Amino acid sequence: MIELLEDPEAPLPAGASYALQPAWARMCRRAFGWELRRWRVVEDGASVGVFALAQVRSRLFGTRLFGLPHCDESPLALEPGALAGESRRRALGGEILGLLDREGSASGALYAELRGLEPLPGSGLRCETPYCRFVLDLAPDYSRLRAAFDTNIHKNLKKAERTVSVQERRSYDEELHRIYLAQMRVFGSPPLPPAYFTGLLEGRLARLFTATVEGKTAAFLFLVVHDGVWHADVNAGLPRWDAFFPKVRLFDETIHRARAEGARAYDFMRTRPNSGVWDHKRKWGGREVPIHYHWRVYRDGGNLDADPEQARYRLPRLLFRWMPEALARRLGPPLRAGLAK
């Protein structure tokens, strides 16, 4: 028999993602006001895993349920070898479906969305793979990893290594936030609040590296680091330094450091297949991994496209790009929290 029992203190199985860690939950509460609830997965009376779920309320986008808002990590973590066999996994799929339906009914949610979850038989959830990630295996030594980089990466690195230096920073400050905000305005995408960066750094769940050119900060790379994997989460820079390729230098340097510190993988994070960013990330030699998105719609009009890259967001993107900086600072984080993307 498989059961899901709500238990905020449920222990995490080995290998549980960074977004199931206490530091991530604390950051979500402080930066976004999200409470991550946790259920124990019980098999024949024994705890074999956890499942997470959060409720996100927004005046613009309505109430929705997310396994783990604002990330593509799986909300389900199981002990190695647990729930072996299709019948057991089908039973778990039915339990998750029942939980989502109960929570959806109680909250009046438009829909439930679970990202990063491997398909479960019996869940009844709509499944698509709108995004992928590239994951670089760090088992080979750095020289072999570098030799596999695309020719264009090598050319840009040769330029960057003459002029760009990389340093690790312990804190996220106003200088870096100005760089980040400027880039997000170019993208027309609502920014994360500073509390996102400071919360993960204080929780020792992230590391921060900056690239300088001519003594000035040109770009930074913010990585979530957990369980032997470096996740390249936020990469931002000032356009006037692009010709020096500081972002390329940051990726190369952190790949080198991750390998030297014994990490097993480097994750370039979410990208849309066949986009320009996708084309750049694949050139580093990582393996392309699809990211499964699962949905359960509860009300007519349940919007599954709450994504600032969609065409319906062209006008808000344009407005965000050109509004005064002070207004963008104030309105951006609440919009990002409402999107939960």
Image (cartoon, rainbow, N blue to C red):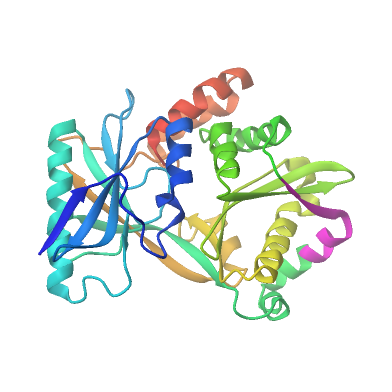
Q: Position of residue 230 (x, y in %)?
A: 57, 60
236, above or below 276, in the image:
above
Q: Quadrant of residue 106?
A: top left
Q: Please indicate whether residue 129 sits to the left or right of residue 156 in the image.
A: left
Q: Position of residue 82 (x, y in %)?
A: 25, 71
Residue 315 appears anywhere in the view: no
315, above or below 4, in the image:
above
Please tell me whether residue 168 belongs to the stretch shown in magenta.
yes
Going 53% across and 35% down the picture, which residue do you hit?
A: 192
Residue extending furthest toward the left: 1
187, above or below 84, in the image:
above
Please tell me whether residue 3 belongs to the stretch shown in magenta.
no
Q: Quadrant where the N terminus lies?
A: bottom left
* Number of numbered discs on residues: 0
Q: Quadrant of residue 250?
A: bottom right
Q: Which of 315 and 90 lies nearest the eye of the viewer?
A: 90
Q: Quadrant where the C terminus lies?
A: top left
Going 73% across and 40% down the picture, which residue do you hit?
A: 238
Q: Please indicate whether residue 135 sits to the left or right of residue 215 in the image.
A: left
Extent of the magenta region: 157-169
Q: Which of 334 and 172 lies nearest the eye of the viewer?
A: 172
Q: Please indicate whether residue 286 sits to the left or right of residue 7 in the image.
A: right
Q: Please indicate whether residue 112 sits to the left or right of residue 138 in the image.
A: left
Residue 186 appears anywhere in the view: yes
Q: Position of residue 99 (x, y in %)?
A: 16, 47
Q: Position of residue 151 (x, y in %)?
A: 71, 73
